[in-house]
Image (cartoon, rainbow, N blue to C red):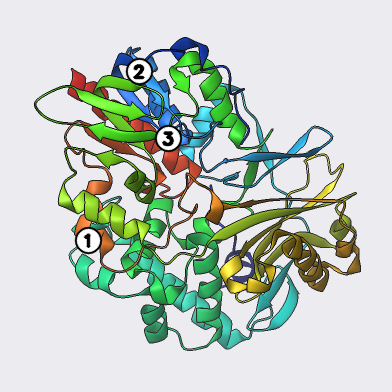
Amino acid sequence: MSASWNRRRFLRVGGAAAVATSLPGPGFARAAVSGRSEGAVRVAIVGAGLSGLTAARELRRGGEDSFVVLEARERVGGRTLNMPIGNGHVVEVGGEWIGPGQDAIAALIRELGIASYDHYYEGDTTYDIEGTVSRGLLPDVTFAEAVDFAKVAWQLDRLSAKLPLGEPWLAENASALDQQTFGAWLTEHAATSFTPAVFRLINRAVWSGYPERTSLLWILHYLRSAGGLLPVILNDGGAQDQRIEGGSQVISERMAAELGDRVLLGRPVLRIDDSPSGPMRVVTSRETFVAERVIVAMAPADTMRIEFTSGLPKPRLDLASGWARLPRLPLVKAAMLYDKPFWRADGLNGAMQSDRSPIQLVFDNSPDDASMGVLSCFLSVVECPHLADRAAREAGLKQELARYFGPKALDAKGYVEKDWSTDPWSTGCITPLTPGLLTAGGEHLRKPSGRIHWAGTESAKVWCGYMDGAISAGARAATEVMASLR
């Protein structure tokens, strides 16, 4: 292995995010249904995130024009959200990045006339690994540690490549892989403490959990869906390669604008009746829709808020309820605002990655024109209870950023955040699947339950967990529905 390969590929670890922006005005969808107690449509879609809106768009493209999209929030975008930071700029506090190989989202933004641009990665990255703070392309690492990490990473990739794409539960040794935690596997295969420390960083950043609680099969499935470990952990040239002009939520806003009054906001779905003896009924907080098919475009855990009066297949119900009980790290994505990106003059790219700091990840999220500076931070309050209060969190994050970027980090001009643990409609934004769930009910991530079809990024075969996966899953669900209606 050459030194250049090692430096380039070893550890450009990125936070695979959390998942996208702003909304059509809340009044645009209301006039069409004002006073209506019941409506009839061919297809009802639950959820106006990337997956649900893509499903609607694909239905219309396929000639199916009788549908409605029901969204609980007063905005579209789901787990993507833009927040204004002044001077016409926004910062994403949900999913935001796209990268090579994410063909579904690349095609969609081209169709919608949305541009993307390279994320800023010029300069050195800051690392805080096993208590040692270092800067450079890679963290401070001995030759033995580098060799050990490369060996374990190769073994992980080799295991993931053997899985059936999108159907890991069909692997010959699926049950054994699913019963083992990622942490136990690392203990068995790593020869240094450095390797588990780095993978702990990756596990916290990408799957919002700890290796000792995360299913090895889930990790392997996730990597298989992305084409391996490097696409997931690389920043420049990987899953965190580019940003969306105008913020990622603009993708959902453009799709919703195209769909017009078919998108209804402030409509949490309370109940879905798929009784075989009659038509399907989708009951919202305001009205009831009669439908021939339903697409539920939500994270599995979030579907537990809906009453399915005819019942769901037990494996699907067990999958969703198990997902809802997962011990996840509740994420806050916060952005500290500055007059300018001062760290760039110091030769830093604004990125920081840690295996144990209150801040898991930091990215330079400054506008493309660098007219102001933005450092976006990922953290979990359960790991730093002293930052549980919002005011304390803002002050504490300044101190943490000053550790890595110097005293200028204390001179922030503003602060915005999104605490996904308090969001009423999303059970977190990233998922660490625990042992046993994937083999017990994984096929029901996509398998229709009667006339109910499932979308959402967790059901994607390719780029599961990413915005790209949400889009491909929505398109797949729409194709299923059109075929079943015919």
Rounded to the nearest whole Å, what is the CA distance between mark 2 and mark 3?
15 Å
The crowd level at tag 1 (other Cα within 10 Å; few <14, some 14-19, many 20+) is many
At label 1, the amino acid type is Thr
The quarter of the picture where the C terminus appears is: top left
449, 235: nearer the viewer: 449
Residue 332 % position (x, y): 61, 57
Can residue 18 be seen by looking at this rendering?
A: no
Residue at the disc numbered 1: 439
Residue visible at 60% across and 35% down in the picture:
249
Residue visible at 37% across and 22% down in the picture:
287
Q: Quadrant of residue 57?
A: top left
Residue at the disc numbered 3: 51
At label 3, the amino acid type is Ser
Residue at the disc numbered 2: 67
Residue visible at 85% across and 62% down in the picture:
347
Ranked by sequence position, the earlier of labels 2 and 1 is 2
Secondary structure state at the residue bearing disc 2 = strand
Residue 51 % position (x, y): 42, 35
Secondary structure state at the residue bearing disc 3 = helix
Residue 346 % position (x, y): 88, 63
